[in-house]
Image (tube, rainbow, N blue to C red):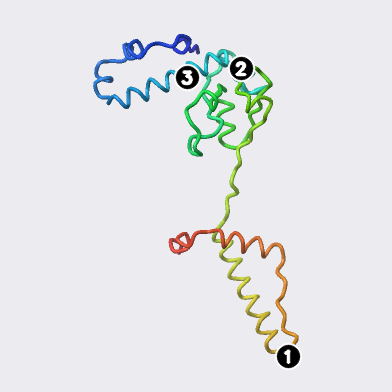
Amino acid sequence: MTYNKYKANLSKEKFFKNWTQEQVSLMSEEQKNFAYAVYELKCDVFNRDSFTCQNEGCKYCKNVKEWPKLTVHHIKHKRNGGEDKLRNCVLICKGSHSAFNRGKDVIKFGDKENLPPHIRGHTFRLHVVEEVNWKEVKKQVTDMKREIKLRVKGMQTGMDADSKHWFNLTMEQMIVLMKFLDRKYIDYENEE
């Protein structure tokens, strides 16, 4: 697969000449500007990165017999406020991109002059949020409440007023409580 359309940065008029008149007529001026800006960014990224995957030692590119499928990766994801800017984009193969976005692999950038300075020589790993079984947490909290009631009742009946003290929670109980307190109340209303 070649990426000839990104080798020469076409003018806006020449860029839309490759489109059908029907496609262009359905687009607003804002949509045309956006489409052309994306094309310009891709041209800049592909040319800066020499049409090669920038993931150092990429194991996915080595397994491809022909030209690897390349994609523009946002260093700071757009969903996290990352912008469509040259310094926030880098060229990697689809295998690396997919594995990184699933949290299965890292992206390691070499110390190449073409790369933006803030990523040179760095390794990036996607933070994968631990899946929490909220039904299990709810059950653990219910069990904990039951245990606390028994302890408090035992303290009230078996001790005099001067010897009543708070009792300690285990680390596991603290973690369960933190998970429980971190959850929005609306999530509990929707559960049966």
Residue 164, placed above or below residue 88 = below
The three-letter amino acid code for the residue at tag 1 is Asp
- Of pointers 3 and 2, the one earlier in the residue sequence: 3
Residue 146, placed above or below residue 190 = below
- Cβ atoms under marks 3 and 2 closer than 8 Å: no
- Of pointers 1 and 3, the one earlier in the residue sequence: 3
Query: In terms of depth relative to the viewer, which is nearer, 93 or 83?
Result: 83
- Cβ atoms under marks 2 and 1 closer than 8 Å: no
Instruction: Say what secondary structure mark 1 lies in.
Output: loop
Quadrant (top left, top right, bottom left, bottom right) of the C terminus: bottom left
Residue topped by disc 2: 114
Identify the residue shown where x is 59% and y is 67%: 141
The three-letter amino acid code for the residue at tag 2 is Asn
Q: Residues within 10 Å of mark 1 (few under 14, many from 20)?
A: few
Quarter of image, res 170: bottom right
Q: Which mark is residue 61?
A: none
Identify the residue shown where x is 69% and y is 89%: 157
| Cα separation between marks 1 and 3 | 76 Å
Q: Position of residue 111 (x, y in %)?
A: 69, 21
Query: In terms of depth relative to the viewer, which is nearer, 115 or 66?
Result: 115
Residue 32, placed above or below residue 191 = above
Instruction: Say what secondary structure mark 2 lies in.
Output: loop
Quarter of image, res 155: bottom right
| Cα separation between marks 2 and 1 | 75 Å
Quarter of image, res 23: top left
Q: Position of residue 60 (x, y in %)?
A: 62, 23
Of badges 2 and 1, the one in the foreground is 2
Identify the residue shown where x is 37% and y is 11%: 11
Residue topped by disc 1: 160
